[in-house]
C-alpha cells in the first residue's frame, strides 16, 4: 500500500486543493470506476472526497467557489 497526496485544481480560482493520505491502489480502483468514492475513502471527509472526484473528472470547484457557482445557477 502506497499513500500519496493528490492535487486538484479549482476551475473557479487558482486554488489547488491538496488531499493527503490517499491510498494509491484505492485511487486506481476509483479511476477505473471499480468503486464508489465514499466506499473507497471512508476516512476522508466530504470536501476531500469532492476533490478526489474532481481529480478523476477534471472538474472541481473548491469550497469557496462552490457556493458562488450555486448562486449563478439560481
Image (cartoon, rainbow, N blue to C red):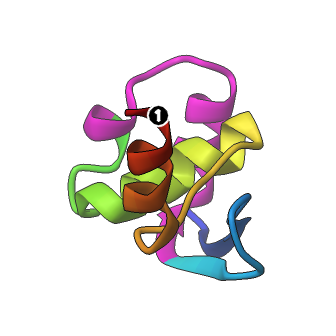
* Position in image of residue 63 (x %, y %): 41, 68
For the C terminus, give its image quadrant. top left
Q: Would you place residue 61 above or below residue 62 in this image?
A: above
Residue in the foreground of this view, choosing between 65 and 22: 65
Taking 13 as reference, is 52 left or right? left
Residue 33 is situated, as x and y percent measured from the top left of the image, at 59, 18
Question: On the rendered structure, is 51 left or right of 24?
Answer: left
Q: Nearer the viewer, residue 22 or 67?
A: 67
Q: Give the extent of the magenta segment.
A: 20-39
What residue does disc 1 label?
73
* Among the 4 quarters of the image, the one containing residue 44: bottom left
**In which image quadrant can residue 29 be found?**
top right
For mark 1, give the secondary structure: helix
Please tell me which residue lies in front, 13 or 54.
13
* Residue 49: % across, % down: 39, 52
The residue drawn where x is 44% and y is 22% is 35
Residue 48 lies, in percent from the top left, at 39, 64
Residue in view at x 37 percent, y 58 percent: 67
Residue located farthest toward the top when viewing the structure as drawn: 34
Q: Is residue 20 shown above or below 27? A: below
Amino acid at each position: 500500500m502506497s499513500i500519496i497526496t493528490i492535487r486538484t485544481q479549482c476551475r473557479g480560482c487558482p486554488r489547488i486543493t491538496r488531499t493527503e493520505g490517499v491510498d494509491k491502489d484505492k485511487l486506481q480502483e476509483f479511476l477505473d470506476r471499480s468503486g464508489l468514492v465514499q466506499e473507497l475513502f471512508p476516512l476522508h471527509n466530504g470536501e476531500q472526497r469532492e476533490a478526489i472526484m474532481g481529480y478523476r473528472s477534471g472538474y472541481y470547484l473548491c469550497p469557496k467557489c462552490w457556493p458562488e457557482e450555486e448562486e449563478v445557477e439560481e
